[in-house]
Amino acid sequence: MDSCEFTYIGRSDSQPKHALGIERSWDELKAEFGRSGPGLPGAIYFKTISVEGPTLFAVVDGNTVLYHEHDKWYHYITAKDVKFGMLNTDERNPARATIDKNYLDDKKWSVTYNT
């Protein structure tokens, strides 16, 4: 499945963070997370599966990252190193990793990056 990852500076501790998400439609994300409001023109949407990062995010023009909160979209001004790839897994709708269960360390996952 298509994936996207990026780094950013956390608002609460000013430390670097890493987010990884799998592509979903805006309608799927609204249904899964009880969100409302319009999508963004030309955006690609992602469900976060990493420990860090927003619940969901969107990418516009390949490098502008936005998160959705209180039914509005907000620009991640510190987002950088945006990379797209393919997440190789047998799971159709993977759950988000937790501190105790970090799927990114699981041997059944691998990411192949687009060049």
Image: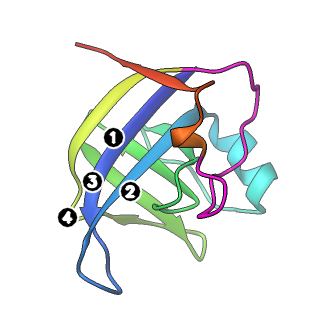
Quadrant for residue 79, please give it. bottom left
Q: Which secondary structure, mark 3?
A: strand
Q: Nearer the viewer, residue 75 or 42?
A: 75
Question: Do the numbered discs 2 and 1 sit on residues whose CB atoms are within 8 Å?
Answer: yes
Q: Which residue is mark 2?
A: 66
- Report x, y in % for residue 97: 62, 53
Are circles 1 and 4 on residues that touch, CB within 8 Å?
A: no
Q: Secondary structure at mark 2?
A: strand
Please report whichever mark, 4 or 3, sits nearer to the chain's N-terminal start.
3
Tell me whether the residue at label 2 lies in contact with that at label 3, contact meaning CB atoms closer than 8 angstroms.
no
Disc 1 secondary structure class: strand
The mark closer to the camera, 1 or 4, is 4
Q: Tell me the amino acid under the disc marked 1.
A: Val
Is residue 91 shown in magenta?
Answer: yes
Q: Residue at x 76, y 26 (%)?
A: 92
Calculate the distance from the C-alpha at mark 1 to the C-alpha at mark 3: 16 Å
Residue 20: horizontal and vertical position, in percent?
45, 44
Q: Quadrant of residue 114?
A: top left
Name the residue type under label 2. Answer: Leu
Of tags 4 and 2, which is closer to the observer?
4
Give the mark nearer the N terminus: 2 vs 3.
Answer: 3
Q: State the mark number for residue 60.
A: 1
Name the kind of residue labelled 4 in the image: Thr
Which contiguous range is marked in magenta? Answer: 88-102
